[in-house]
Amino acid sequence: MEVFRLSGVENHLYFKNLSRIDERVIFDNVTGILSKTPGIKFGEEQLFPYSDELWGEYNGVEIRLILDTEEGTELYCPDKDSLNQLEKIISQQ
């Protein structure tokens, strides 16, 4: 799974879907990776009209894993250092 960032968007990670698989598979894979990571706690999945979201914390910092029905899967974290750490964790899998 390849992780990337968009220029000018500092608080999000995105995931390339080169195999054109169902985005739910990518969302579930990232969920599995993050759920095994020490310091991460997720709540219940939130279902909205155009997205499914997992809200949680990473070492006390808010994170959101988002499955957007049009844009795919992304990870939001307002703290740059935490987001950099999460990118390394996900990229190593």
Image: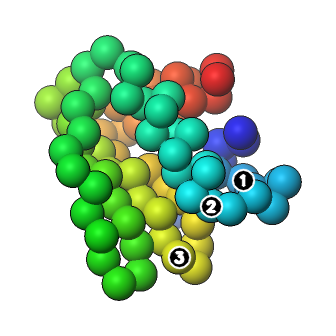
Q: Residue at 28% of width from left, 27% of height from top?
A: 40
Locate the C terminus by quadrant. Answer: top right
Disc 3 target residue? 69
Q: Which mark is residue 23?
A: 2
* Sequence-wise first label, 3 or 2: 2
Would you place residue 71 above or below residue 30 in this image? Answer: below
Which is more foreground, mark 3 or mark 1? 3
Measure how far apart labels 3 and 1 are at the Cα level: 15 Å
Residue 59 as seen in the image, left or right of residue 93 = left
Q: Are marks 3 and 2 in contact (CB under 8 Å)?
A: no
Would residue 42 be visible to someone looking at this image? yes
What residue type is disc 3 on?
A: Thr
Report which quarter residue 43 is drawn in. top left
What residue type is disc 1 on?
A: Lys
Q: Residues within 10 Å of mark 3 (few under 14, many from 20)?
A: few
Q: Residue at 58% of width from left, 73% of height from top?
A: 71
Regarding mark 2 in the picture, which secondary structure is present there?
A: helix
Q: Nearer the viewer, residue 9 or 4?
A: 4
Which percent across, then down, holds residue 13?
52, 49
Q: Residue at 23% of width from left, 31% of height from top?
A: 41
Q: Residue at 48% of width from left, 33% of height from top?
A: 32
Regarding mark 3 in the picture, which secondary structure is present there?
A: loop
Which percent across, then down, holds residue 65?
39, 51
Report which quarter residue 62 is drawn in. top left
Residue 85 as seen in the image, left or right of residue 64 = right
Would residue 10 be visible to someone looking at this image? no
Regarding mark 1 in the picture, which secondary structure is present there?
A: strand
Which percent across, then down, holds residue 50?
41, 81
Disc 1 target residue? 16
Q: Which mark is residue 40?
A: none
Would you place residue 27 above or below residue 39 in this image? Answer: below
